[in-house]
Image: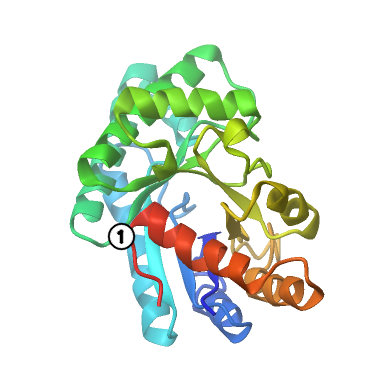
Amino acid sequence: MPIFDNHIHLRPEFRGVEAAKDFERAGGTAVLLTHSPYADIPIRRAEDYDRAYGKTLAMAEAVRRATHLQVFVALGPYPAELLGLQGTLGLDPAVEAMRSGIDQAARFIREGRAIAFGEIGRPHFPVAQEVVEACNGLLVYAMGRAKELGCAVVLHTEDPTPATFAEFARLAAKAGLPADRVVKHHSTPLTRLEDNHGLVPSILAKEDLVTEALHGGPRFFLETDYIDDPQRPGAVLGPATVPKKTKAWIAKGLLTEDQATIVHREMPERTYHIEIR
């Protein structure tokens, strides 16, 4: 059975490949390696994104060389970076730098080195309304690029409610991107279509969340959001969590094998247009 972690961060200066090996030893077979900020590559201008993305892509290659895992990559400007750029450049130039970061990610997606924009969106904490509006504008821009490229987007935002899902569905429609190509990372377990408006929830691999999510059916992803930070070991969840929990839930009858196949193979294939082996 394939086992897919939809959202994991790995850093070569920390556990990196060893964390990926933990996932594989536990029975994991595929990951979405998602770009996130690097302390050693601060984003001060648009040109910095190319080097930052290169580090994520190199990490993916290192894992492929050291394991049998399928490693897919999502690239994009992390939403909170807008605040730092705004502080040094001003809001409008900061937005242009982030837009350039989206365009640079699009180049790697077009080349087949990444499969999605991510994680993009807006800060998960309160910010000024002008920042929210700027982030929403960048999100529509990225969604438009995703439509052009035929790829998905992975959202980083506040915890979603049905109203939040409806807002993102409207933004996707404005960009012409189908809602089922929009993945809400670190999602609440709102799996009914009337609640998520066709977006795809990606849920932390915790039993209470999965139990609730299954009430709406297995139309969701599982993720750890492992951040590979030695100061926060195991945060958010450890890299072996998704395969360990999936097997345990099947054994106890919480999850059927058919449901697990939908979560771990059918959903990533349908959403990202990839083949899970």
Q: Is residue 155 left or right of residue 124?
A: left
Assign a secondary structure to mark 1.
helix
Q: Residue at x 21, y 39 (%)?
A: 148
Question: Which residue is under mark 1?
Answer: 54
- As rendered, which of 18 and 252 lies closer to the eye? 252
Image height of 128 relative to 211, above or below: above
Q: Residue at x 59, y 64 (%)?
A: 228
Going by the numbered disc 1, the residue's amino acid type is: Gly
Image height of 121 relative to 11, above or below: above
- Residue 38, x across and y down, in percent: 47, 53
- As rendered, which of 195 and 163 lies closer to the eye? 195
- As rendered, which of 6 and 42 lies closer to the eye? 6
Q: Residue at x 41, y 52 (%)?
A: 271
- Residue 143, x across and y down, in percent: 33, 34
In the picture, residue 218 is in which quadrant? bottom right
- Residue 36, x across and y down, in percent: 47, 51
According to the image, what is the colour scheme of the structure? Answer: rainbow
Image height of 68 relative to 108, above or below: below
Quadrant of the snapshot with the C terminus: bottom left
- Residue 57, x across and y down, in percent: 33, 64
Q: Is residue 263 left or right of residue 182?
A: right
Q: Residue furthest top?
A: 129
Q: Is residue 8 visible?
A: no
